[in-house]
Image: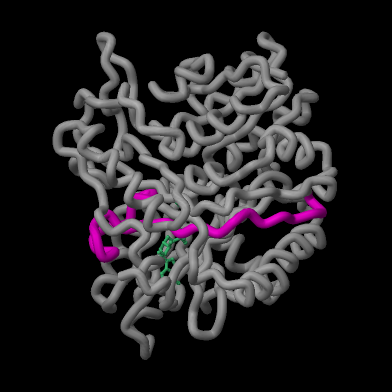
Amino acid sequence: MKVLVVGGGGREHAIVWKISQSPKVKKIFCAPGNAGIEKLAHCVPIDPLDLNSLLDLVKREEIDLTVVGPEAPLVEGIVDIFEREGFKIFGPLREAAMLEGSKVFAKNFMKEYGIPTAPFEVFDNSTDAKEYILKSQKESFVVKADGLAAGKGVVVASSKEEALNAVSNIMERKVFGTAGEKIVIEERLYGEEVSILSFVDGETIIPMVSSQDHKAVFDGDKGPNTGGMGAYSPAPVYTEEIHKRVVENILKPTIKGLKEKGIEYKGVLYAGLMITNEGPMVLEFNVRFGDPEAQPVLFRLKNDLVDIMNAVVEKRLHEIQLSWSEYPSACVVLASKGYPGKYEKGKVIKGLENNFGEDVFIFHAGTKKADGEIVTAGGRVLGITAKGKTLKEALDKAYGVIGRVQFENMHYRRDIGEKALRRLGLL
Ligand code: AMP
Ligand code: GLY
């Protein structure tokens, strides 16, 4: 088989790495890829949103399966186009991708089908939104731009002033462009977050092992939100009891609700959950693997990923049984100075040639080759991923690599996995 992976971040490196282990796969293409992916795949400099060029590539190279990493091409309808042309592609159709592409759609959908989520209001003008905030009895709010904003369209505001500011930025200054034409203002939830990614073929839904992301840029969950500074799997906060409630009250009703609406969901469904005192509630849906959650989760997957993806595309996921390594895993992201704001680029990365043993893998995100060296080329640069007999061991192995691999002014969180270690009584 020939497989094309669309995207070029840490998540896509993890997908390519896993696909490269399949005996069925003869050649992997990646568009556009990065300096790490280049070692496993033939990288083609095509933007993930250039759907016509991607389609041409698939026709020219006779690619058997396309796997879409990021959300933007899904929301643009890459799956609709490829399927219309008769090509196999892993990911949801445009209509189903609205679960991530529009927060208003997702919130209204959850309300309609009784899926637990924070109470919310939708606004299409800043005057009404501001009046709502000023009149509210509450002091904290979460303000969300409706459309895609590269993970930055959500402001968790601890005061009315912060919430009013967020409304001004999104609706008046239009910092996210048309993505901010509508906003959702919702109640702030408290608890620990968990990401539950599932494979879905329209009918059958199979959850993967749990993981927990670290969204804030600094230790102690301080500072602005990023795409994710690290993740580990499994998340001890996610007990069997909670899992049952998630399956019954969230995952099953979501697939049933979509079907009732005539929307067939195929691909990975990512439920971003808050485990509150009242139980699990949905913060957001994403229509793809999480980044960095894909790194520790795929690190533990024993199945051939291509078998699963084929089963999803051919709607026979019920034939698949997932099998996982018992070993916990962790991924620590090394980021460029300035990220998630304007960040430095072009710093030489040293130490990548070292051998770190089979329990460690360094997934590349924003990296590229320049003059024979590998340099930084993005906000998130590397995801040091490791597994161990215990989560503590996995974390020690991942952190043990830092220093042996480095670049100037690199920044990383030193507290990945601490919530779990505390919960396990190890801190
Ligand atoms: P979203 O893109 O909707 O997941 O939001 C991004 C991040 O904002 C989440 O991962 C949470 O950390 C935070 N967040 C979103 N909604 C809420 C909420 N209702 N209460 C507290 N935090 C939230
Ligand atoms: N790590 C969060 C996301 O992939 O959206």
- In terms of image quadrants, where is residue 77? top right
Q: Residue at x 53, y 18 (%)?
A: 41
Q: Is residue 97 left or right of residue 86?
A: left
Q: Position of residue 150 (x, y in %)?
A: 41, 46
Residue 137 drawn in magenta: no
> Front-most of 334 and 155?
334
Q: Residue at x 37, y 66 (%)?
A: 421
Q: Position of residue 84 (x, y in %)?
A: 78, 29
Vertical relation: 270 (above or below) 37:
below
Q: Residue at x 22, y 25 (%)?
A: 350
Q: Residue at x 36, y 79 (%)?
A: 133
In the rendered image, which quarter contains the N terminus? top right
The answer, for residue 177, to whether it is visible in the render is no
> Front-most of 188 and 134?
188
The answer, for residue 375, to whether it is visible in the render is yes
Q: Position of residue 419 (x, y in %)?
A: 36, 68
Q: Is residue 178 left or right of residue 20?
A: left
Vertical relation: 380 (above or below) 262:
above
Q: Is residue 360 left or right of residue 26?
A: left
Region of the chain picked out in magenta, as a range: 202-230
> Front-most of 119 and 124?
119
- Colour mode of the rendering: one colour
In the rendered image, which quarter contains the C terminus? bottom left
Q: Position of residue 204 (x, y in %)?
A: 80, 54
Most extreme residue toward the bottom, as rendered?
Answer: 137
